Structure formats: C-alpha cells, structure tokens
Image: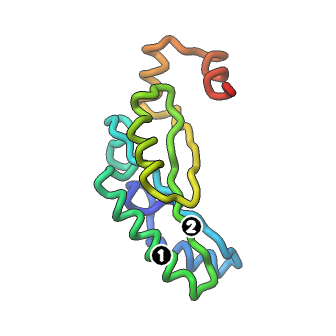
Amino acid sequence: MHTTLCGHAVGETIEYAMMAAERGIDLITITCHIPMRWEAFGQAGIRMPLEELDDYMAVVKNTAEQAKPLGVEVLCGIEAEVYPDEVELEPMDEILAKYDFDFVLGSLHAQCRSYIEWLAKNKVKGDAITAFLFKG
C-alpha cells in the first residue's frame, strides 16, 4: 500500500494498520513508489520526490511503532521500477543500496509516457518486449 507522499493514496498509514487489525491481518507492508529523476516518472500524482524519501521512512517507522499494540507488524517496502534504460535506473539502485527496506516490490509501469517513448524510440515491439521482460 502507498502513503499520501506518492500523490495517489488516501488516508493515514495508521488507518491501514487499524483496518488490518479489524480484519485479523497481522502483517502489512507499505510500498510507496521509489523516486525517479526522469520527469515522466516523477510527475505529481505518481511518486514521491527524492527529498521526501526520509520523510517516508519516518512515517513507516512511526506507523510500525503505533501498530504494535494493535498486533499488526508494519514492514517498510518500496515499489521499485523495471525500466529498459539502465542509466535511468542507476539512481534507483543507489537508493536501494542506501536504505534498509524490508521488501522491494518490482513493478513495470508500461503505461507511463517515458516507457512508451522509450519503446517507440528504440523500435521495440511485441515479442521483443516479452523477451526483454523475461530475459534470464
């Protein structure tokens, strides 16, 4: 689940923990989108800016402390990005190395303008996309 720092979540993180407790769920993970420097990944309403990452970490830590008496463990995660341009991923790799996340969720936002433009610019279509996504 996200926090309001990403621009498209509602409510307070403690409310998520309270709802989890009401429903008998004893573990939740907060996973806001990782900051990305490219405008198409960082526009308002998609992800928090880099300067708010420390605030995010503090919010999750505070929520974890508040949720303990409710019997809910709160983990700190981040929703990282799968993207074909390795240069754009270098700052993300630095964030992942710097912070101690409990969980890293990999996501592919192929609907983002940056992704669509990259595919068009590099003339990637159909089977090539599948090959890229599932290369091992």
Q: Which residue is mark 2?
A: 75
Q: Residue furthest front?
A: 97
**Residue 124 occupies which quadrant of the picture?**
top right
Q: Is 27 positioned to the left or the right of 112 in the image? A: right
- Between discs 2 and 1, the one toward the N terminus: 1
Going by the numbered disc 2, the residue's amino acid type is Leu
Q: In this orientation, which residue lies closer to the viewer: 54 or 7?
A: 54
Q: CA distance from mark 2 to mark 1?
A: 9 Å
- Disc 1, SS: helix
In the image, residue 56 sits, relative to residue 25, either above or below, namely: above
- Could you tell me residue 47's position as x and y percent? 40, 49
- Could you tell me residue 53's position as x and y percent? 36, 57
Circle 1: is it few (<14), some (14-19), or many (20+) Cα within 10 Å? Answer: many
**Residue 91 occupies which quadrant of the picture?**
top left
* Circles 2 and 1: CB atoms closer than 8 Å: no
Q: Which residue is mark 1?
A: 63
Going by the numbered disc 1, the residue's amino acid type is Thr
